[in-house]
Amino acid sequence: MKKIIFVSTIAICFLAAGGYLLFAKEREPSYVTERIERGPLVSTVSSTGTLNAVTTVQVGTQVSGTIQKIFVDYNSPVRKGQIIAQIDPSIFNSQVEQSQGNYRFAVANLSKLKAVAHDARRTLERNRQLLREGIVSQGDFDAVEAKFREASAAVTGAKGTVLQARGAYKQSLMNLRYATIRSPVDGIVVSRNVDVGQTVAASFQTPTLFTIAQDLTKMQINTCVDEADIGKVVVGQPAVFTVDAYPEMQFRGVVSQVRIAPIVTQNVVTYDVIITVENRDLKLKPGMTANVNIEVMRKFSVLKVPSSALRFKPRENGVGAAWKVTMERHGKNGASGQKIFLLKDGKPDPVPVQTGMSDGLYVELVRGKVRQGQEVIVEQTLPKKKAATTGGVMGPRF
């Protein structure tokens, strides 16, 4: 009996040790790795902007009136000087006739007053001679001289009236000319804000009737770049962007201007960056939202690792002396600075590194005891514990 108990105890000990080792083995962590590669790396600054025509002209009116005719519509190509709308000219024609009549009357009145002044001058000269001969008195001469001066003043006033009438006449002619709305540039009508019969008033602010894009084959993106990235952006850098209308296509542009005026929105400071874009096939349209990546730096052959490798930190599971040694080494070497973990003999081996530029997914390795092709750990997984099973031998029922 004692022998049976002794053998059973030894068997139970072996089973417990095997289960413990099996359980510990199952809890050994596993790692996801990627190879250190050598290749090109591009650093970009991302932003969102709006496509606009390089030159957009808002066509208004300088006179008030009722729209009588409209000769163009949306998307109509126009030439410089082409008539695009007509304001009812009836009132302006009446003003021209009225001002023209006033001008002619002023000219005629000036001629009349000049004749009176000329007659007064001759009378003054005769009386001056008669005064020398003693035929007329000084009082009579002074009266004639006063009439001459009065006639001369009337001529001067009449000249001013002529100038006023001529100015009013020219203004009425100009208003009549402004009643015919012409295109100031060659381009395409992108918006029309009036209809036939609508009354426009130009009393305080010039109303906008049409918006004309001068040349849609060349467009620009107005994008706002954060103050943290604006120092990297300079004129001449290439840019790649996409629009929602063509998600499968990439368009290219060039940074043409970096404006120094800050734009503050809810305490966030940004700067306007202008990107010039070719649009020969007219696929891009004003107002489209562009997702822009500005290339600020490019290197063609560098050692690079995934960004996740720099964020990786091993997690201790409390099993195995070798694992504890690795964690102690990690703590000693990882007190400061950047590091990555190489997979060495199935365990993470920390290696201090110095990094350079990044494209968001990969980071350049500037210094460090690493080489191309080594496995770097990017993720660690711990297997879940197996659910404990319980059971027993059913004894006899009492």
Image (spheres, rainbow, N blue to C red):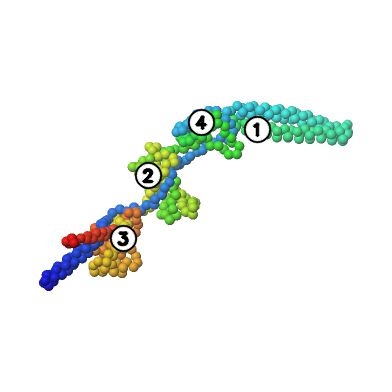
Which residue carries the number 4 mark? Answer: 84
Q: Earlier in the sequence, mark 3 or mark 4?
A: 4
Q: Residues within 10 Å of mark 3 (few under 14, many from 20)?
A: some
Give me the residue at 48% from left, 30% from top.
72
| Picture disc at residue 242 | 2
Badge nearest the viewer, 1 or 3: 3
Please determine whether, in this image, residue 369 is positioned above or below residue 279. below
Q: Which mark is residue 22?
A: none
Labels 3 and 4 touching (C-beta < 8 A): no
Residue ID for mark 3: 312
The quadrant holding residue 242 is top left
SS state under label 1: helix
Q: In which quadrant will I find the C terminus?
A: bottom left
**Whole-number angstrom distance, CA of label 4 to CA of label 2:** 35 Å
Mark 1 surroundings within 10 Å by alpha-carbon count, few (fewer than 14), some (14 through 19), many (20 or more): some
Q: Choose top left, top right, bottom left or bottom right for residue 60.
A: top right
**In this image, 7 relative to 253: left or right?**
left
Left or right relative to 222: residue 97 = right
| Position of 345 relative to 59 (above/below) | below
Report the quarter where the N terminus lies: bottom left
Residue matched to label 1: 168
Could you classify mark 4 by the number of other residues whose Cα lies within 10 Å: few (under 14), some (14-19), or many (20 or more)? many
Q: Position of residue 344 (x, y in %)?
A: 23, 63
